[in-house]
Image (tube, helix red, strand yellow):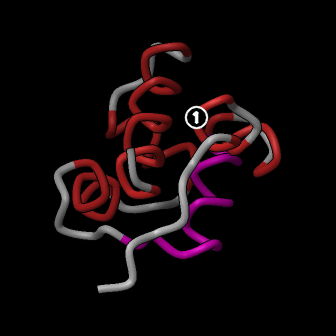
Amino acid sequence: MNTYLSVKDRILQLLAEHDLSIYALSIRSGVSSSTIKSILYGKSKNPGAVTLKMLCDGFGISLYSFFDTPTFRSLEPEDLE
């Protein structure tokens, strides 16, 4: 799995865990619904650190907690094509 898919899956996981819709996360985080959808639907495959921090704030977690998962710990280096 690559980093983009890992980020996307983690956001979807957290949406489910917190029982939030994209719209609710948008309100809580200050990140527009269209930006969140762009990440989740593949239009934006490289969300910035500030955007991820804002999403984490919306979930009420730290960036460390976002990335502290077995998936992120086992990511292979990105293919630099």
Q: Give the image location of residue 32, x and y in percent.
A: 36, 61
Q: Give the image location of residue 68, x and y in percent.
A: 76, 37
Q: Give the image location of residue 22, x and y in percent.
A: 33, 38
Quarter of the image with the N terminus is top left
Q: Which residues are magenta?
A: 46-58
Q: Give the image location of residue 12, x and y in percent.
A: 39, 30
Q: Amino acid at mark 1?
A: Thr
| Residue for badge 1 | 71
Q: Which residue is drawn at the image coordinates 63% and 72% (left, top)?
A: 49
Q: Secondary structure under badge 1?
A: helix
Q: Nearer the viewer, residue 35 or 27?
A: 35
Q: Nearer the viewer, residue 17 or 70?
A: 70
Q: Which residue is drawn at the image coordinates 46% and 38% (left, top)?
A: 11
Q: In which image quadrant can residue 65 be found?
A: top right
Crowd rating for badge 1 (residues with CA inside 10 Å; few <14, some 14–19, many 20+): some
User: In the displayed structure, does residue 7 sit left or right of residue 42?
Assistant: right
Q: Is residue 54 magenta?
A: yes
